[in-house]
């Protein structure tokens, strides 16, 4: 894939909070199977993890099942690092945040 196509695909991938958390843990860990991963994550119900794993697989961000190794794909790695980089960039641009009223000024 060309860099433009990959970047375009990453920009349109929408992930829930749980899916982002799951993808990040997969990227930072070395689990041999999806079952091992599901058992290791205790703060999210197992059924929710399985549901989100199937969604992430359908989006092409992870691979597992059908004799495939449980792993994050290249697109998954780029998506994970892209969302982290974007969040960092946004955090650097936010000034005068007031969590009490949920407002922030964005530096232009």
Image (cartoon, rainbow, N blue to C red):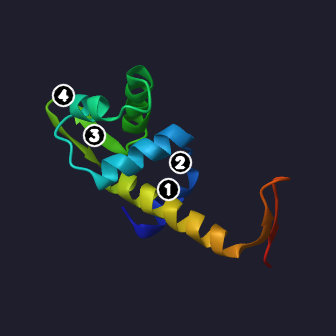
The dot on residue 40 is none
Q: CA distance from mark 2 to mark 4?
A: 24 Å
Report the front residue among 35 and 78: 35
At 56% across and 57% down in the image, what residue appears? 11
Is 12 positioned to the left or the right of 20 in the image?
Answer: right
How far, Cα to Cα, is label 3 from label 4?
Answer: 9 Å
Q: State the residue position of label 4.
A: 66
* Residue 84 percent across, percent down from the top left: 50, 62
Q: Where is residue 90? Give x, y as percent.
A: 65, 68
Disc 2 crowd rating (10 Å Cα; few below 14, some 14-19, many 20+) is: few
Left-right relation of 62 to 3: left
Quarter the C terminus occupies: bottom right
Q: Secondary structure at mark 3?
A: strand
Task: Quickly name the residue at label 3.
Answer: 63
Q: Which residue is mark 1?
A: 10
Q: Find residue 104 and report its horizontal and vertical position in percent.
A: 81, 64
Q: Are marks 4 and 1 in contact (CB under 8 Å)?
A: no
Residue at the spot of label 2: 13
């Amino acid at each position: 894939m060309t860099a433009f196509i990959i970047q375009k695909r990453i920009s349109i991938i929408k992930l829930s909070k749980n899916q982002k958390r799951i993808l990040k843990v997969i990227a930072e860990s070395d689990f041999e199977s999806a079952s091992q991963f599901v058992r290791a994550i205790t703060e999210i119900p197992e059924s929710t993890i399985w549901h989100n794993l199937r969604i992430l697989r359908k989006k092409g961000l992870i691979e597992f099942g059908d004799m495939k190794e449980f792993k994050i794909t290249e697109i998954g790695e780029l998506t994970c690092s892209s969302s982290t980089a974007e969040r960092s960039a946004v955090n650097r641009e936010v000034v005068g945040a007031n969590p009490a009223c949920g407002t922030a000024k964005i530096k232009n």
